[in-house]
């Protein structure tokens, strides 16, 4: 976000905002940002590496796609040793830092849209309602219908094993 620009009212931790409010704010953030870039890692990349390395990869991709070099790189959470650029890590940064909160909102909106598209293709997994997290309905669908190419095998395996151990 431009340093001299006035903060957008209502920007906060994306998890505390309604979907409609996130959508509204994301549009304003994208309009006012000096630039925005997204990065992602595929299910295959997460499985081949691990979630930490895949997160670092996605962040590097986003940084490479920026059309303006950032003055500083801020990361929500702990430092990422494999990021390859100097950065400032802010634990619970989406609650403490305006720029991180803006990035969190844009990322959550993109992720929610992806989950809605997956839900349209695979409604039995109720992705629209769980945003990719293992709700009881989603876990039951995994047991009944198996995995899709969009599921992380190692994560699903551990969730299903835990459910079996608990007798659910």
Image (cartoon, rainbow, N blue to C red):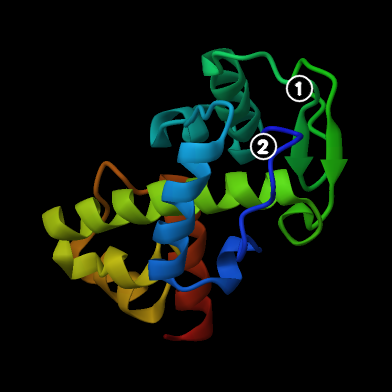
The numbered mark at residue 152 is none
Q: Position of residue 91 (x, y in %)?
A: 84, 53
Front-most of residues 160 and 117: 117
Q: Position of residue 20 (x, y in %)?
A: 38, 68
Q: What residue is rendered at 41% in x and 59% in y? A: 24
The numbered mark at residue 52 is 2
As helix, strand or loop, the secondary structure at mark 1 comes to loop
Q: Does residue 102 lie above or below 65 as drawn?
A: below
Front-most of residues 158 and 64: 64
As helix, strand or loop, the secondary structure at mark 2 comes to helix
Q: Does residue 31 lie above or below 45 as drawn?
A: below
Residue 157 in view in this figure: no
Q: Quadrant of the N terminus?
A: top right
Within 10 Å of disc 1 (Cα), the crowding (few <14, some 14-19, many 20+) is few
Tell me where residue 2 sits by quadrant: top right
Measured in 3D between alpha carbons, the distance from the residue under mark 1 to the one under mark 2, in whole angstroms, is 9 Å
Q: Does residue 151 lie above or below 160 as drawn?
A: above
Q: What residue is rendered at 54% in x and 26% in y? A: 35
Residue 100 in view in this figure: yes
Q: Are marks 1 and 2 in contact (CB under 8 Å)?
A: yes
Considering every residue shown, the one lying at the far bottom of the view is 167
> Is 27 situated left or right of 87 in this image?
left
Q: Position of residue 62 (x, y in %)?
A: 55, 24
Q: What residue is rendered at 30% in x and 64% in y? A: 127
Q: Considering only order in the chain, which callout, 2 or 1, is on the residue closer to the N terminus?
A: 2
Q: Position of residue 154 (x, y in %)?
A: 48, 47
Q: What residue is rendered at 78% in x and 53% in y? A: 93
Front-most of residues 121 and 134: 121
The numbered mark at residue 82 is 1
> Is 107 situated left or right of 128 in this image?
right
């Amino acid at each position: 976000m431009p340093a001299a620009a006035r903060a957008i009212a209502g920007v906060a931790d994306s998890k505390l905002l309604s979907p409609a409010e996130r959508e509204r704010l994301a549009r304003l953030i994208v309009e006012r940002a000096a630039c925005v870039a997204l990065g992602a890692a595929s299910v295959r990349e997460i499985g081949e590496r691990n979630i930490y390395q895949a997160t670092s990869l996605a962040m590097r991709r986003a940084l490479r796609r920026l059309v303006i070099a950032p003055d500083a790189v801020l990361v929500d959470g702990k430092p990422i040793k494999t990021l390859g650029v100097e950065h400032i890590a802010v634990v619970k940064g989406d609650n403490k830092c305006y720029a991180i909160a803006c990035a969190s909102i844009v990322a959550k909106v993109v992720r929610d849209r992806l989950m809605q598209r997956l839900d349209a293709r695979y409604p039995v997994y109720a992705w629209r309602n769980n945003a990719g997290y293992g709700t009881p309905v989603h876990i039951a669908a995994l047991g009944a219908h198996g995995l899709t190419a969009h599921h992380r095998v190692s994560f699903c395996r551990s969730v299903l094993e835990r459910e079996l151990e608990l007798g659910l």
